[in-house]
Structures are given as C-alpha cells and as structure tokens.
C-alpha cells in the first residue's frame, strides 16, 4: 500500500504546534530588539592598528614596530617578524615585547639601527584568547617604496594540510558528541527497550569512538595547528607540554578523562541495564544512569565552553553555562533524531509511544536552542550591519534558515507521529506458516540434539522478527514517518556542519570593529582601566621580578584581569603558582580570591572578575617561584 499524506484534521499536537509558532514570533521580536541595542562582546582577537601603519612611507627608520589588538593574545618566539627587501630579519628580538597599557593590547619588536631605504614586510601570528590562531602581514616603506623579494603569506594561521585535518577532527568531535549524548538520552528517556537493540548500541559506541579519536587528534595537532603547520611537530614533546599548559590543552585532556567515564556509562547502559528484568531495580538504575550520564555529558560540553568563544568577553560567567545548555540541546535533538532514524530503519520493535516521547523531547530542545541562541547571537554579532556584512553573520543567517527548514520538516513528522499505531503481529501468520512452524516444533521436541534445537529456535526468532518488520514497514503512517525523519536527518547534518564552522569563525562584531580600526573593549562609564606594577622578591634563586596587572574596565561589575610576570632581566617569567585576592577593607569585603589561567609564558588572565562596589581596593598577589620560595605583595588601587 502506498503511503498517503495525513489529513489536516484535528490533532492532539495542535496546541504544541501553536506554541511553537508563538515561540518563533517571540524569538523574532526579541532577536530584533537585542540586535538593535546590543553592546560589544569580546572574542577572537583582531589586529586594530600598527605603527608604522600598513602601506605607510616614513622618512626615517623607526626604532620599533608595534601592533595593537582588540583583545589579549598569546605570543611566542617569532610571533612578529620584520623582513627587509631582501628577506633578511630586520628586527632584533625573537619574542615580542608586551607594551600593553590601559585598555590597549600592544606588542612590539625593536629594529636594527641604520636600516636602508625600501619596503619592509611585517608578518605576525598569535593565539586569540578564545583558542583560535590568528595571523596577518602588511608592508611599510622607509624613504620610498621599493621592490621586495618577500611574498606576503597567503596561508592564514591554522591553514594548510594540518588545518584541514584539525578542522575535520573538530567536525568529527561535534558529530561524535551528538551521537553519544543524543543516542544515550534517546534510550533512557524515549525507548528503554533500545538498550537491548544492537543497532542502537553500535550508534552510541561509534559516537564515543569518533569523539575520542577526534579529541586525541586535536590534542596532538594543537601545537603545529597554532604554530609551524608541520605534521612532524605533532610529536614534539616540548610543544605538547606547552599545549597542556593552555586552556585548550587542558580542555582536551579533561574531555579524554570524561570519555573514560562515558565508556563505563555505555557498558552499564547496554549491559547490566539491558539485562535487568525487575521493574523496581530497573527504575532505580534508570535514575542513576540519568544522573551520572547527565553529569558526564555536561562535563564534556563544558570542555568546549571553557576554551572557545563563550570563555572570553563580557558575561563569561553567564555565557559558558548558556553554551553548555545549547550544546546539550543540540545533542538531545539531533542525536535523538539519528537514533530515531536508526530505530525506524533497523529495528522492528520501536513503538508509537517512544516516537511520541521523542517528539516532546525535541520540542523542549528547540525551546532551549531558541533561548540560548538569542543570547549567543547578541554576544557575537552586536549589530545588523555585522549580521549581514560579515562571514560570521552570514553563517548565522544560514544556520537560522536551516533550523526553520528543519522545523518545517519536523512538523510533518509530528503529523505522522499523531497517526502512528502499533499493529498486532501474531494474527498475521498464514495457516500454512502456522502449521509449518508447529511441525518444526514437533521435530525439535523429538530431536534430542541441543545444537539442532538452538538452531531451530534462532530460525524461528529470525522469522518472527522478519514478519514483524514486514508488517510494520507496510504501515503507511510508519513509512511516511521514516521518510520525513530521513529528510530531517539530512538537514541536521548540514546544520551541524554550519554550527561547527561558526565556532572557528571570527565573530561579526570583532571583524566589523577591526575593519573600522577600533578596539573592541567598551569604554568605562566611570573611572578607567587600572594598571599596577609591583616588584617582588621570594628570596630564592631567580626569585626577583615584577608583576604587572591590568584590570579592565576598572569599574564595578564584571572585569577582565591580566597579569604579566617579568624576571629581573625584563623577560617573561613563568612561575609555578600565581594567586590574587581583592579586599575592600573600608567595607569589610573580601578577600575575594582570583585564580587566573595561564595564557602564555609569563602571562595569565581571568575573565568576569566581579567587583561588587567602588572603593579603594587592596590587591594581594602571591607569587611562588619554587617549592619553598614564595612571597605575597599588595598594592591599593581605586576602582569604580
């Protein structure tokens, strides 16, 4: 029988659909209001200026070249290179000097004296605070422009073959996360019988394998991805150690540890849980698996939130949990959709109740996605011009369009779900088949060979399963649902790819402000950025140095804090431990502890440091330079 479309008569899902339509209208209204009044949000650093500027012609050779950025960056050896017309190095320093002050992030390198006239090339590369590599190049001329043998690099940081493999691993990681979390949630929430289904088990295990393999690849390739671009550097132990000291490296290692716990969860779900027959015991185990699995899934999602766009900029303490919710909602919806597709095509046992439960889960996921997506768009886009005129904004528009298409297809799936029934199977056997089955049973009874009896039992089970599948496949409602779910899955694959591209694309607000040559930090309403310089001496060997602190915007509320530690020679100095605490003694507030993250050698930062009120704050800094050498220094600063 050919499938026919369901009639548009009354349906029990009308009210949820009406709610979805109302939600979509509210989303559009709020989205417009938020974009109209959005403020700046920091993520994905960009070059905002240089001295000399791009294309400038100066009369005399400058003493140094400086570059300004929209936000804090991590630099290393050769991050800024100045090349003369013949391609030789014109700068004197392997590692750039940090010249940041106030709200301006600036790095510079000194030039050799007596440089001849001609065109000079400045090539730079760094790592943004949201973990993405950035790079660029420009030229300036001394005296007059000249021919140069230096070709501006056409490949951006993170490009080339290493970048391609790293991006493939990034896509694979998201896909594996969706299958692992969404498939497990589908079994626990929607179809508990799926725990005994081999196709469902394979789906979840393959998701785990994909996420684990992709995470390992990203960890190994992180050093060449942000540096040389050579595969051989993936096995450089010193480079791997430097990666482990960064936020992205720590996030990848944390993800691997959590995946170990996820493997145990999978073993219990498709082992002990699948074999459990006592309903009370199974109910208790379901609760335990749901809680444990939820904690592990949240932890894995947090490894993205703690190291990418959500971890930098305004309201990071809000943005990171919102990002976690967004990822979990994506996994529940798209991973559940993949599970439903496998169940409809590969198993004959899934019933209408399970499909309806997933329909409710999918609706709830869409609500969460809409709310969290609005907030993320506000942080990363900021204006209508950035929405339509930048690559990030255009990808965001494409993502919204794909979600609209997916919801439209899902509407048809919900219509088919409303008409889905569970036909009986036993009554469909033909008399001849019944007699044949009975004859085989008698033969099996008479035969004492247990091997033969087991073989006949397997044949009868396979025959019964085939009959059930044939009868269910002949159901026009089930056939229509399978086709619509397949269409949903096809759109979902494209949607997941676009979402992954967004995570590695410079946010529209940053791109637009960099094009205008303005830094992205918002101007303080009162006061201004706080800059402190504090010498220290722990008393041990190499125990002397200087701590420099920037607190921006230097007012009450959320602030970004950066700390630089320089040795006695003025070069960046790594220390085993660095802690800060803020105390407002006049109001008996504090000490408020701050534990910054290490961004690069001698450079630490902390986002969303909350300062509750204005006043004269005492800032304590604890520096430890060895196992036994430690000192705490303090200085007062007017904030607010």
Image (tube, rainbow, N blue to C red):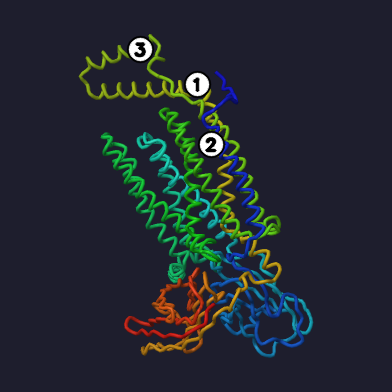
Q: Between 468 and 210, which is closer to the camera in this rendering?
A: 468
Residue located at (42% from left, 76% from top): 589
Q: Is residue 370 left or right of residue 623?
A: right
> Hey, which residue is sitting farthest right in the picture?
144
Residue 343 falls in image quadrant: top left
Identify whether 143 is placed above or below 413. Answer: below
Label 1 Cα crowd, 10 Å radius (few <14 / some 14-19 / many 20+): some
What's the CA distance linking mark 2 and mark 1? Answer: 29 Å
Quarter of the image where the N terminus is located: top right
Residue 474, numbered label: 1
Is disc 3 placed on a helix, strand or loop?
helix
Residue 512 image offset from top left, x and y in percent: 68, 64
What's the CA distance linking mark 2 and mark 3? Answer: 45 Å
Mark with earlier residue (3, 1): 3
What's the CA distance linking mark 3 and mark 1? Answer: 21 Å
Identify whether 539 is placed above or below 561. Answer: below
Q: Between 419 and 451, which is closer to the camera in this rendering?
A: 419
Residue 620 falls in image quadrant: bottom left
Quarter of the image where the C terminus is located: bottom right
> Hey, which residue is sitting farthest front in the picture?
587
In front: label 2 or label 1: 2
Q: Which residue is mark 2?
A: 16
Proximity of marks 3 and 1: CB atoms separated by less than 8 Å: no
Identify whether 406 is placed above or below 212. Answer: above
Residue located at (40% from left, 57% from top): 256
Residue 2 image offset from top left, x and y in percent: 57, 20
Q: Between 170 and 631, which is closer to the camera in this rendering?
A: 631
Residue 268 image offset from top left, x and y in percent: 31, 44
């Amino acid at each position: 029988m050919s499938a026919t479309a369901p009639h548009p008569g009354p349906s029990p899902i009308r009210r949820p659909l009406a709610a979805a339509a109302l939600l979509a209208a509210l989303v559009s209204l709020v989205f417009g209001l938020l974009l109209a009044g959005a403020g700046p949000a920091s993520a994905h650093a960009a070059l905002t200026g240089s001295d000399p500027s791009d294309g400038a012609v100066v009369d005399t050779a400058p003493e140094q070249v400086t570059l300004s950025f929209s936000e804090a960056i991590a630099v290393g050896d050769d991050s800024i290179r100045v090349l003369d017309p013949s391609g030789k190095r014109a700068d004197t320093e392997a590692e750039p000097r940090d010249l940041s002050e106030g709200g301006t992030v600036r790095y510079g390198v000194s030039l050799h004296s007596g440089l001849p006239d001609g065109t000079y090339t400045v090539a730079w590369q760094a790592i943004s605070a949201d973990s993405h590599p950035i790079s660029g190049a420009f030229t300036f001329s001394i005296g007059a422009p000249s021919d140069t043998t230096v070709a501006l690099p056409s490949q951006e940081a993170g490009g080339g073959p290493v970048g391609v493999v790293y991006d493939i691993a990034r896509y694979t990681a998201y896909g594996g996360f969706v299958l692992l979390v969404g498939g497990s949630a589908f079994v626990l929430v929607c179809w508990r019988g799926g725990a005994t289904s081999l196709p469902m088990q394979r789906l979840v295990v393959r998701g785990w394998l994909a996420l684990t393999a992709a995470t390992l690849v990203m960890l190994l390739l992180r050093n060449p991805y942000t540096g040389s671009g050579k595969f051989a550097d993936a096995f450089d132990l010193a480079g791997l150690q430097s990666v482990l000291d960064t936020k992205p490296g720590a996030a990848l290692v944390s993800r691997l540890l959590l995946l170990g716990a996820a493997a145990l969860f999978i073993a219990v779900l498709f082992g002990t849980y699948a074999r459990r027959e006592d309903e009370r015991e199974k109910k208790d185990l379901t609760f335990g698996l749901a809680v444990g699995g939820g904690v592990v899934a949240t932890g894995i999602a947090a490894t993205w939130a703690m190291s990418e766009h959500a971890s930098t900029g305004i309201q990071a303490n809000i943005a990171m949990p919102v990002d976690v919710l967004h990822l979990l909602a994506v996994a529940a919806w798209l991973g559940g959709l993949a599970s439903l597709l496998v169940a409809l095509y590969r198993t004959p046992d899934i019933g209408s109740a399970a499909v309806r439960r997933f329909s409710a889960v999918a609706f709830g996921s869409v609500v969460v996605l809409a709310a969290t997506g609005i907030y993320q768009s506000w942080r990363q886009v900021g204006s209508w011009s950035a929405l339509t005129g930048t690559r990030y904004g255009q990808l965001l528009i494409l993502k919204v369009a794909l979600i609209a298409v997916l919801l439209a297809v899902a509407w048809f799936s919900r219509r088919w779900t409303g008409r889905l029934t569970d036909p009986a199977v036993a009554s469909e056997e033909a008399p001849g088949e019944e007699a044949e089955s009975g004859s085989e049973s008698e033969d099996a009874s008479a035969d004492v060979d247990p091997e033969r009896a087991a073989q006949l039992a397997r044949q009868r089970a396979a025959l019964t399963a085939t009959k059930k599948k044939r009868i269910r496949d002949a159901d026009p409602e089930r056939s229509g649902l399978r086709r619509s779910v397949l269409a949903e899955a096809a759109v979902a694959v494209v949607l997941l790819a676009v979402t992954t591209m967004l995570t590695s694309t410079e946010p529209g607000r940053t791109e637009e402000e960099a094009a205008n040559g303005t830094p992205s930090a918002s101007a303080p309403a009162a006061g201004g950025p706080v800059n402190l310089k504090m010498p220290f001496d722990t008393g041990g060997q190499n125990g002397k140095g200087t701590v420099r602190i920037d607190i921006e915007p230097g007012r009450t509320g959320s602030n970004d804090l950066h700390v630089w530690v320089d040795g006695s020679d003025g070069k960046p100095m790594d220390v085993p431990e660095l802690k800060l605490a803020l105390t407002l003694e006049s109001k008996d507030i504090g000490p408020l502890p701050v534990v910054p993250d290490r961004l690069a050698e001698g450079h630490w930062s902390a986002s969303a440091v909350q300062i509750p009120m204005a006043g004269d704050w005492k800032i304590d800094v604890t520096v430890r330079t060895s196992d036994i050498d430690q000192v705490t220094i303090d200085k007062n600063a007017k904030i607010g």
